[in-house]
Amino acid sequence: MTDPSRTPTVAVSNQKGGVGKTTTAINVSGALNELGNDVLFVDLDPQGNATENLGMMEAYDAEPPTLFDCLTDPERRDSVHDIVHDHAEMDVLPSNIDMTAAEPELTLSRRSGEQLALLLERVDDDYDFVVVDCPPNLGNLMDNALYASRNLLIPALAESTSKRAFELLFDHVEALELDYDITISERGVVVNRIDVRKNQATEMVDWINEAFDGVPVWEVRERAAVQKALENGSSLLEYDPECDMCEVFLDVAADLEEQFAAREVEA
Ligand SMILES: Nc1ncnc2c1ncn2[C@@H]1O[C@H](COP(=O)(O)OP(=O)(O)OP(=O)(O)O)[C@@H](O)[C@H]1O
Ligand SMILES: [Mg+2]
């Protein structure tokens, strides 16, 4: 069971690279903010794309303490308060160049998958939602994101290669559930960069809808404004509120609100 007393936390995960994790994480955070939620965005990817997109390169290049220290050294967990950065739409725990050493470092630590959860406990009371942007591999960082969140939002491309990516992801999630005796809930799939002129895209969207029975599937079309918004340091909702894809991200946010409200009622 996900713990309903905890702040709703969602890991935006798919070990396949370039499928729209960062784009989805930033835009869903922007949409949650638009709906009146206080959002903490966690950039767990050592590449730091979201940190750069959100205009925080100085944090990526900063000297310790950084997210790396807070995550890998229990004695420095409290420094997390010092590294939360302000953005117009959300608070941000930025990635840092040192995060490239986090995978091996976490392997050496006790309770290697639980470190992000222990860190977020320090700050998440201040927020309505926590959104974690994951790196593109099935490693310790991804495990930390899944363990801390227990909730999964899966961005994917409308390509046949996505089938194998889903298989690998779910094998991994199942193994983690068994290892830690936890339940991880799929909260939705965001099919990204859809080009409706391609038959393969429509076929894949149909396949995903069938395969993910009972899990919401959203469709984001290929739009220059989506890319430009990130280059401009904000979500699409801030950058181009007229863009037709804003509605999709607002739908995802509203649905997450609903799913988590239902979770509280059940408890
Ligand atoms: N709907 C869209 N329309 C146009 N461009 C998009 C759209 N979604 C994503 N992109 C672009 O696709 C590229 C990959 O997206 P993104 O960085 O979000 O993927 P990712 O899964 O986070 O990648 P990585 O695995 O490297 O972390 C980016 O350049 C992004 O701007
Ligand atoms: Mg990314």
Image: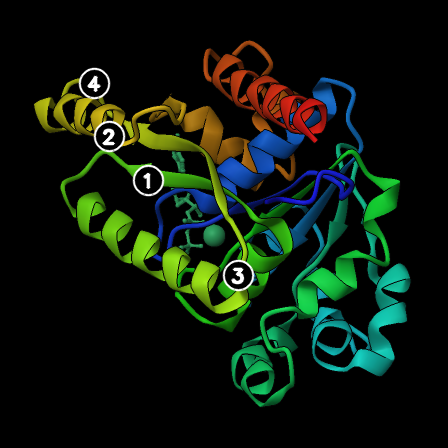
Task: Identify the secondary structure beneath mark 2.
Answer: helix
Q: Where does the image place residue 156, in percent across and percent down from the top left?
A: 33, 40
Front-most of residues 58 and 150: 150
Q: Ligand 1 closer than 8 Å to the CB at disc 3?
A: no
| SS state under label 4 | loop
- Mark 2 is surrounded, within 10 Å at the Cα level, by few (under 14), some (14 to 19) or many (20 or more) other residues, namely many
| Dot in front, 3 or 1 | 3
Image quarter for ligand 1? top left
Disc 4 marks a residue whose amino acid type is: Val
Question: Do tag 3 and tag 1 residues touch (Cβ < 8 Å)?
Answer: no
Pick whichever of labels 3 and 1 is earlier in the sequence: 1
Closer mark to the observer between disc 4 and disc 2: 2
Residue plotted at (78% across, 33% down): 128
**Point 60% across, 14% down: residue:** 241
For residue 16, say whether it is visible.
Answer: no
Mark 1 residue type = Ala
- C-alpha span from label 4 to label 1: 15 Å
